[in-house]
Amino acid sequence: MKKRLNITIEENLLDKIKTYAERNETSISSLVEEHFEALIKPKPKLKNGMSLVEYMKSLPKFDIPDNYDYKEEYYKAKAKKMGYEDLF
């Protein structure tokens, strides 16, 4: 069930929002409702309240040699998994 909500905003902002809504073929009510939904949507929790960027920076770094051949290692691993490691 929908209810009516009265809000007060600056006139120049209202004009911009009306223009935006018209260009995007939506209503101001829909824009407000979508914004409120986004505000109350639960945020994913990371350990210690970290942001995603902070969490990614905290992950361990890999020290891979410059001459590491990814393709060769991939095929070696596949051969080992299939039981054909003696062919490599």
Image (cartoon, helix red, strand yellow):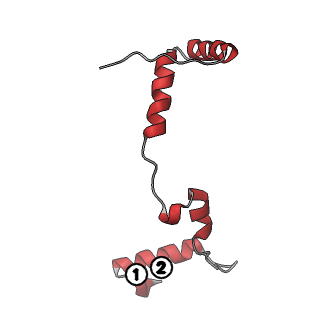
Residue at position x 42%, y 74% from top? Answer: 78
Q: Which mark is residue 66?
A: none
Residue at position x 41%, y 78% from top? Answer: 79
Residue 54 location (% of width, % of height):
61, 62
Q: Is residue 26 visible?
A: no
Residue 30 location (% of width, % of height):
46, 20
Q: Residues within 10 Å of mark 1 (few under 14, many from 20)?
A: some
Residue 55 location (% of width, % of height):
56, 64
Q: Tell me: residue 7, above or below residue 84.
A: above
Quarter residue 10 falls in: top right
Residue at position x 45%, y 78% from top? Answer: 77
Quarter residue 19 falls in: top right
The amino acid at mark 2 is: Lys
- Residue pointed to by mark 2: 76
Q: Dividing the image into 4 quarters, which one contains the N terminus? A: top left
In the rendered structure, are the residues bearing label 2 and label 1 in contact, judged by CB atoms less than 8 Å apart?
Answer: yes
**SS for dot 2:** helix
Q: Tell me: residue 25, above or below residue 66.
A: above
Q: Residues within 10 Å of mark 2 (few under 14, many from 20)?
A: some
Left or right for 14, reference 5: right
Left or right for 11, reference 28: right
The amino acid at mark 1 is: Lys
- Residue pointed to by mark 1: 80
**SS for dot 1:** helix
Left or right for 37, reference 56: left
- Which is nearer the eye, 70 or 13? 13
Q: Is residue 67 visible?
A: yes
User: What's the distance in space between the residues labelled 2 and 1, CA to CA?
Assistant: 6 Å
